[in-house]
Image: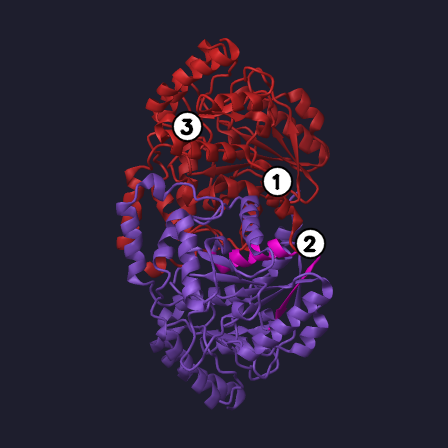
Chain colours: A purple, B red
């Protein structure tokens, strides 16, 4: 029988995708340059030239039988070695190849991590606002997603509410810092408190509560901000990384899982990932992409545009009287809408050719997300539209 | 909690992988050229030069933002169009882009197809001998695998036993022709009988029984053999294809699902695949690999070596008195062992540096598989070992 859970998903509408579709259609009418599309989190800068050169070199110099041959179930050993070394050098934890598993981006990493450390019916806690795709990654694994309401003052963690929600059924906690959609970086204080609670509760319940750390924006951190490395604060942590943003390769679907070298059953979790991958017929990301990112792992695209755009937008939003936490990284900002219903707010914004995503699907109604991974020139031009919108609709 | 189903899988030993590991170690002792490793089904011919040239051209001529950008959930439209056209032209069924979903090889395709058309607890029937990886693809989706005992005379289908095993709970039937491990191609007569039974039972139970057709060896068919196109015989059929063998790209993990244009809810199944992929964080194969195979879809590697090897081995096996069905395609042959216990047989073969895989894990004890995707020169040299083995151990 046709599986109704997947079929029913076809009825769900992604607000982000819908807005993106609207922007594409509107661009046909008035020209792409006149639509201020802040809907999609798609990198707007080129991959480093070295990435292209690496692929060309691999194709020209490697025996194609080896280049395109089967990758071992747990990944290409030299690739795992390079990923481990890069983490070891940067974060001073003793990572080895056996702590790494290559995945299809952070998405694949989270989907694998959840399947490894949760049994069906167990709970994964995350914090609003959160990336809406967490829901399918978690619920389709058979686990249950629990969402802690947002800390609206700073987008850190409402620990009082969090403590009420942890139970014996909590198998994992999923965090994302720097954060989509807020752009906020968790402070050292937040991570220390989080770790202390997880350690205490793990002991109380007699099983580890794993901390799954979604880190696709790790490299996009703004001046004056320090992004603490999550795994330094809690031993039972599992990093889910993606090269989509750091190397601007979202379509190549490449990232990794890195279990903390001190993680309970960490090496077993990595080996289990090989079995999970086998069960979904995936069997490792493509060899050539694994090899290419391993060669360029210390590089990033020129990410400076995101900080430039953030500065322009943040100051304009503040001067228009928006309530807004300043992002410390990513290419998102998450201000409070100028009316209670962010959907109605977003609808009105369309009249000004501004595509703003209402915060409801991120678990945070009344707010909206702007993905400012667009040209700075366009950000500047969007300010006139933003001002007219705020003035004409809300008297700002 | 650590998920025990995946953890327990780590205890299972893959006989194929173990033999392959043995061959690698033995090669260190006596030299690679002296180990007759028939264990792994890894292509032994280079990808077509045009594949490499296509990748180089894509890298040199395409805007990297587009080349490495997000692929739409259902695949890159131009890629789907090219796959559909190639199927339309070759098999004369009216395939369109909306009947195609790009996957990580046939493995990913089967894992998606099973999740789309089976609900947990429902049954998928396959026929022994069968590719052992079918078990994780199916059982980890929540469905139940049922295996029809083998037709030892011709490795077609024991329809009497099959008819007894179909029930109301049968959601899908999974076939593989040309077949791993037997090399046998299902005849037109087999496919017609199969289709008639499925049509009758679907009607009786009031729901379609889908036919999932695993076709990674579609292009490896030997002289004088015709491999009928499965989907021409049954409308509710789903092709699972891989480029691993046709283009010798097993490490690049690329293939597709093609639903029969007449398939009940076929287009819905394709759209559901997008959701299944989303749930495992996969979101389409890498863009650059999708684009490259679409450009070279009408090509294959030079596959002639497999037929040469088959001819040599088949004749030698027959002349040594092995009971053996002649393969019509693939790079496998599946003779009867010279003693009842194929594991003991395989163990003795190791003394002659012959790596032969016992048939037990394929659901067919007493037989063994040889994967002759190795150099013809080595096949020829292996004959001496094969003769000594048969003579010294079994007096042949």
- The quarter holding residue A374 reads bottom left
> Bounds of the magenta span?
A105-128
| Contact? badges 3 and 2 (CB < 8 Å) | no
Q: Chain of mark 3?
A: B
Label 2 sits on residue: A120
Identify whether A257 is placed above or below A32.
above
Within 10 Å of disc 3 (Cα), the crowding (few <14, some 14-19, many 20+) is many
Position of A3 compared to A22: left or right? Answer: right
Identify whether A195 is placed above or below B110.
below
Q: Chain of mark 1?
A: B
**Which of B351/A389 is in front?**
B351
**SS under mark 3:** loop
Tell me, yes or no, whether dots 1 and 2 are on the same chain.
no
Q: Which residue sits at x=56%, y=84%?
A: A338
**Which of A256/A134 is in front?**
A256
**SS under mark 2:** loop
- On the image, the x and y values in percent for residue A250 come to 42, 60
Q: Which is more foreground, mark 1 or mark 2? A: 2
- On the image, the x and y values in percent for residue A334 come to 52, 78
Q: Which residue sits at x=49%, y=44%?
A: A73
**Which of A87/A130 is in front?**
A87
Label 1 sits on residue: B138
Label 3 sits on residue: B220
Distance between mark 1 and mark 2 Cα atoms = 18 Å
């Amino acid at each position: 029988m046709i599986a109704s859970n997947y079929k029913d998903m076809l009825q769900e509408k992604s607000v982000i995708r819908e807005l993106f579709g609207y922007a594409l259609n509107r661009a046909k009418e008035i020209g792409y340059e006149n639509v201020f599309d802040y809907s999609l989190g798609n990198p707007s800068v080129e991959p480093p030239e070295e990435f292209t050169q690496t692929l060309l070199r691999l194709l020209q110099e490697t025996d194609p039988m080896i280049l395109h041959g089967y990758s071992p179930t747990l990944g290409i050993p030299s690739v795992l070695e390079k990923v481990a070394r890069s983490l070891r050098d940067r974060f001073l934890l003793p990572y080895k190849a056996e702590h790494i598993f290559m995945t299809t981006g952070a998405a694949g990493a989270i989907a694998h991590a959840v399947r490894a450390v949760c049994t069906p019916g167990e709970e994964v806690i995350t914090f609003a606002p959160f990336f809406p795709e967490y829901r399918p990654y978690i619920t389709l694994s058979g686990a249950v997603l629990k969402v802690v309401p947002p800390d609206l003052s700073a987008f850190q963690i409402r620990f009082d509410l969090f403590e009420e929600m942890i139970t014996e059924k909590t198998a994992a906690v999923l965090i994302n810092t720097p954060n989509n959609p807020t752009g906020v970086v968790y402070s050292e204080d937040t991570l220390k408190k989080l770790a202390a609670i997880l350690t205490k509760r793990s002991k109380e319940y007699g099983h580890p509560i794993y901390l799954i750390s979604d880190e696709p924006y790790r490299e996009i951190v703004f001046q004056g901000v320090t992004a603490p490395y999550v795994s330094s604060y809690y031993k039972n942590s599992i990093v889910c990384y993606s090269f989509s943003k750091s190397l601007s390769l979202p379509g190549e679907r490449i990232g990794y899982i890195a279990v903390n070298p001190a993680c309970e059953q960490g090496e077993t979790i990595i080996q289990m990932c090989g079995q999970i991958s086998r069960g979904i017929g995936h069997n490792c990301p493509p060899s050539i992409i694994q090899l290419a990112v391993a060669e360029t792992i210390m590089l990033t695209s020129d990410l400076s545009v995101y900080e430039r755009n953030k500065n322009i937008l943040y100051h304009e939003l503040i001067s228009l009287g928006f309530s807004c936490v300043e992002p410390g990284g990513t290419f998102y900002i998450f201000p409070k809408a100028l009316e209670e219903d962010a959907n109605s707010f977003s609808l009105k914004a369309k009249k000004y050719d501004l595509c703003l995503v209402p915060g409801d699907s991120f678990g945070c109604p009344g707010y909206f997300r702007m993905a400012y991974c667009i040209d700075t020139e366009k950000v500047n031009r969007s300010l006139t539209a933003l001002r007219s919108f705020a003035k004409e609709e809300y008297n700002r």
